[in-house]
Image: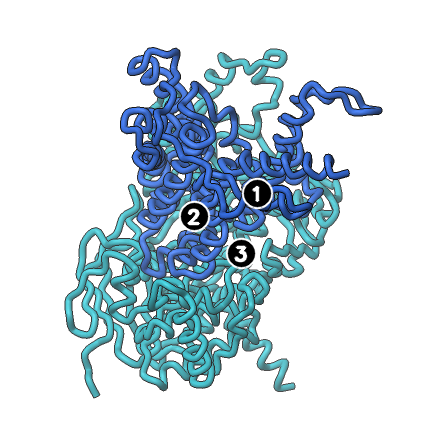
Chain colours: A cyan, B blue
């Protein structure tokens, strides 16, 4: 058997503006294997694969296909090299038939008729060979997502792909559909195809891959034979053991609950239940951390509590007032009025308007506050005075309230958001990824502020994918997996134990035990 | 009775004449918008083409040379639109509006500078205008009841551009739904990322659509100045580009529908002309503005969802951006 790797990547680098999405990536993919690439959302997996498929170009680095160094300037080149990709968001034309989608870009001739007929025959052959049944004349928009994905696979096979990249293929699938997909992948492997499976789900990696590479924050941190590793090890590699964070804090003195969540269920726009019957409380004077591999429902939970996402059902008790989240139409402003402040996970998308100046951003969401207005007009003097005070208190640099927030560093941008939310003295602070893309100095500062909030007798709900951050700050840790809270631990929680919970291992063991009984 | 029939034939005859520029422009917009490039500049391109055709038709006394000039001007304006909205990913509406103003101003300015007739081009010499084509036996059959007027008035006696416009309908359908180019064109208007990942250049494809649009707009504009009339008049498109755009929405971006929509709007125009100054029993005189407004009113009613839904190509108006920044 030929031992030349199907794909070899050498020192791939790719930046999007200031974001270094891929840093010196090396990767070797054996022919005829299923190679998993695992990492959290934003670890750079999709970027790397898009480079391989010619959708993006690497800034530096080499791509070697079947032993030959190649350049892949566009997807056409990738297709010619026998690389096919099933994107996370399907690249299908909704109002075209399956056949039309399959032949798009591979039509054979100027007139369609010939290509369509050839494709019809070829599809029938592929269907037989790989059990990829789908009605060739159905419109994509009428097909369930599982079948749409099958069309994507057929597209690649129709172009005689030898290497098939699947980007988070199970994100939109039901468990049964996912199992069927894995069967298809095994058939493909037995036919000698090479498969690159991108995912953040450990279970899938263990179930189907031969080799697994772990990415974290744009870097390739490890490659293992799947048979020789474990979910625990992979979880640890994914989340990473960065510099141990130390936060000086005295023991918490929690009082009565300020926020209680009961039976919260959230369904997203695709109809997938992302938060499943979650109940917990946050007491005054404590920081409750929610740990979990990203994509397990934490973001949706936070957004629902902040009033920017609708719940399917559930109740929220805040300061003694009970709100039925399933029926209420409270928005973010109402939540703020109930003394809940929110530092969103993604400050660029939800926390700031980057083309606005600092002082304008410093009152976003609080712009209706009478303190900032003079009749129907904004009281610019008051707003600026407040902004200057916040800049000083939070050491925001450069100390210029007129500067557009786009020109501040990540850490300072985050401080602007934090100052805005904390300085309104809320009873509950919801914080998502407070130190994502923030430098070490600012991390320390932000952590200190959060502990100060706690010591002032406020409730803090902290969502973070940084396990160290969760452990350093939280007085109680809740672990979310697959939309559910699968465990609660104290501030002294063991990292390995948390890792297991985050990987859903504990949960699965329980299930197995349940099944055995 | 026969009088009424004859009147109807005459109205339909002028419907065909009035629909032709709408139809050409509407099909032009169809190519562009099906590819995801919204073109509000149909009006400007038509006007530019009308001027180019009128000027060259006068200078060369050759209608075909006039037509080519019209097409060249229109394609040129289309390429400006393409450069702004495809290459530089600008706002397609803004670019289209700019094209309209550019054409309006330039035709008047150049017309006055070159010909000194208040923005008009001089009347076309013999040969500079497309002549009406008379079908065989049209004269002989004129007096045959029923069929006679139908043949000799309605079908016969139009210039070549009219016939080409109606031939362009099945041709457009064939191109869009039966050729590789058409498949890709429709795909790029729905999901350009799918086209890109299939290894096809989104940019080049959209440019070709914009060029096809320019060619058809060139026909539409030339029809006005060197077929329907004999020379260019300032602002002679008089909103026909916008009516064509309304027809395109009315037709839900489908070629055969486009023809019927344009015939309907042309018919309204013909009726308006016919009824001008005439009093209808029981209603009185209908102001001509009512008929002029009808296409727009109908389109608004359509858009409000009363006559089914008009769903534009999904990617229409959105510049294609691959890289995150």
| Horizontal side of residue A344 vs A392, given as left or right | right
Q: Which of A321 and B229 is in front in this view?
A: B229
Report whether residue B148 is seen.
yes
Image quadrant assignment for residue A116: bottom left
Callout 1 secondary element: helix
From the top left corner, tell me how far across and down residue A158 is, in percent: 37, 73
Q: Which mark is residue B35?
A: 2
The answer for how far apart the CA atoms under marks 1 and 2 are is: 40 Å
Could you tell me which chain the residue with mark 3 belongs to? A
- Classify residue A218 by image quadrant: bottom left
Task: Say which of marks 2 and 3 sits in front.
Answer: 2
Residue at (61% x, 36% y) in the render: B265
User: Where is A139 relative to B131, above or below?
Assistant: below
Q: Distance between the residues labelled 1 and 3?
A: 89 Å
User: What's the mark number on residue B152?
Assistant: 1
Q: Is residue A394 visible?
A: no
Same chain for marks 2 and 3? no
Q: Which chain carries label 2?
A: B
Q: Do the residues labelled 1 and 2 touch (CB within 8 Å)?
A: no
Helix, strand or loop under label 3 = strand
Would you say A422 lies left or right of A39 here?
right
Q: How much space separates mark 2 and mark 3, taking CA atoms?
A: 52 Å
Residue position for label 3: A477
Q: What element carries label 2?
A: loop
Nearest-to-viewer mark from 1 and 2 = 1
Q: In this view, which residue lies farthest toward the right? A: B282
């Amino acid at each position: 058997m030929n031992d030349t790797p199907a794909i070899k990547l050498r020192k791939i680098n790719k930046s999007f503006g200031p974001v270094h999405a891929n840093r010196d990536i090396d990767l070797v993919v054996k022919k005829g294997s299923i190679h998993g690439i695992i990492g959290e959302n934003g670890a750079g997996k999709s970027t790397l694969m898009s480079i391989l498929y010619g959708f993006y170009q690497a800034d530096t680095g080499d791509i070697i296909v079947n032993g030959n160094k190649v350049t892949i300037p566009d997807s056409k080149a990738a297709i010619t090299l026998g690389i096919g990709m099933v994107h996370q968001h399907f690249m299908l034309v909704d109002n075209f038939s399956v056949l039309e989608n399959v032949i798009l870009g591979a039509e054979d001739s100027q007139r369609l008729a010939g290509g369509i007929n050839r494709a019809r025959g070829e599809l029938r052959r592929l269907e037989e060979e790989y059990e990829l049944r789908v009605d060739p004349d159905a419109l994509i928009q009428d097909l369930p997502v599982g079948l749409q994905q099958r069309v994507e696979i057929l597209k690649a096979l129709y172009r005689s792909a030898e290497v098939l990249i699947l980007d988070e293929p199970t994100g939109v699938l039901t468990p049964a559909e996912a199992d069927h997909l894995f069967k298809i992948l095994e058939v493909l492997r037995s036919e000698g195809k090479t498969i690159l499976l991108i995912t953040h789900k450990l279970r899938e990696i263990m179930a189907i891959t031969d080799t697994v590479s772990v990415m974290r924050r744009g870097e390739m941190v490890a490659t293992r034979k799947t048979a020789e590793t474990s979910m625990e090890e992979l979880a640890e590699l994914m989340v990473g053991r960065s510099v141990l964070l130390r936060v000086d804090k005295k023991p918490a003195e929690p009082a009565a609950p300020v926020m209680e969540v009961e039976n919260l269920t959230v369904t997203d726009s695709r109809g997938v239940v992302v938060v499943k019957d979650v109940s917990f409380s946050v007491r005054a004077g404590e920081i409750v951390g929610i740990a979990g591999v990203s994509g397990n429902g934490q973001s949706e939970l936070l957004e629902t509590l902040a009033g920017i996402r609708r719940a399917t059902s559930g109740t929220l008790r805040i300061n003694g007032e009970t709100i039925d989240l399933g029926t209420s139409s409270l928005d973010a402003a109402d939540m703020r009025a109930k003394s809940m402040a929110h530092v969103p996970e993604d400050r660029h998308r939800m926390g700031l308007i980057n083309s606005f100046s600092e002082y304008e951003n410093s009152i976003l969401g609080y712009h209706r506050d009478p303190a900032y207005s003079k009749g129907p007009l904004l009281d610019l003097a008051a707003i600026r005075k407040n902004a200057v005070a916040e800049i000083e208190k939070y050491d925001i640099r450069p100390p210029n309230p007129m500067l557009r927030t786009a020109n501040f560093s990540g850490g300072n941008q985050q401080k602007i958001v934090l100052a805005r939310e904390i300085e309104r003295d809320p009873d509950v602070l919801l914080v998502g990824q407070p130190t994502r893309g923030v430098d070490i100095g600012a991390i320390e500062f932000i952590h200190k502020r959060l502990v100060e909030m706690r010591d002032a007798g406020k409730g803090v709900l902290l969502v973070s994918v940084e396990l160290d951050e969760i452990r350093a700050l939280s007085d109680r840790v809740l672990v979310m997996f697959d939309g559910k809270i699968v465990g609660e631990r104290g501030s002294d929680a063991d990292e390995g134990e948390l890792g297991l919970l985050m990987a859903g291992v504990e949960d699965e063991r329980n299930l197995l035990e349940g099944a055995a009984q | 009775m026969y009088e009424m029939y004859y009147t109807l034939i005459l109205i339909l005859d002028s419907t065909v004449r009035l629909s032709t520029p709408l139809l050409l422009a509407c099909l032009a917009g169809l190519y562009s918008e099906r590819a995801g490039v919204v073109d509000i500049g149909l009006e400007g391109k038509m006007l530019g083409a009308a001027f180019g055709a009128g000027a060259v038709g006068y200078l060369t006394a050759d209608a075909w040379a006039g037509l080519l000039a019209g097409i060249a001007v229109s394609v040129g304006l289309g390429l400006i639109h393409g450069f702004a909205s495809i290459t530089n990913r600008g706002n397609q509406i803004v670019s289209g509006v700019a094209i309209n103003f550019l054409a309006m101003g330039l035709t008047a300015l150049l017309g006055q500078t070159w010909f000194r007739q208040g923005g008009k081009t001089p009347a076309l010499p013999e040969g500079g205008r497309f002549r009406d084509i008379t079908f065989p036996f049209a004269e002989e059959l004129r007096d045959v009841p029923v069929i006679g007027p139908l043949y000799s008035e309605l079908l016969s006696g139009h210039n070549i551009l009219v016939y080409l416009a109606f031939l362009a309908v099945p041709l457009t359908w064939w191109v869009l739904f039966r050729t590789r180019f058409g498949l890709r064109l429709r795909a790029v208007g729905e999901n350009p990322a799918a086209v890109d990942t299939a290894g096809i250049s989104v940019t080049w494809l959209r440019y070709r659509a914009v060029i096809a649009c320019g060619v058809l707009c060139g026909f539409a504009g030339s029809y006005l100045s060197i077929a329907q009339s004999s020379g260019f008049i300032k602002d002679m498109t008089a909103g026909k580009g916008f009516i064509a755009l309304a027809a395109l929405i009315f037709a839900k971006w489908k070629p055969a529908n486009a023809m019927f929509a344009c015939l309907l709007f042309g018919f309204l125009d013909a009726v308006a002309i016919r009824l001008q100054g005439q009093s209808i029993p029981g209603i009185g005189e209908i102001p001509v503005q009512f008929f002029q407004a009808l296409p727009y009113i109908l389109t608004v009613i359509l858009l409000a969802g009363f006559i089914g839904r008009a769903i534009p190509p999904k990617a229409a108006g959105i510049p294609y951006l691959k890289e995150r920044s």
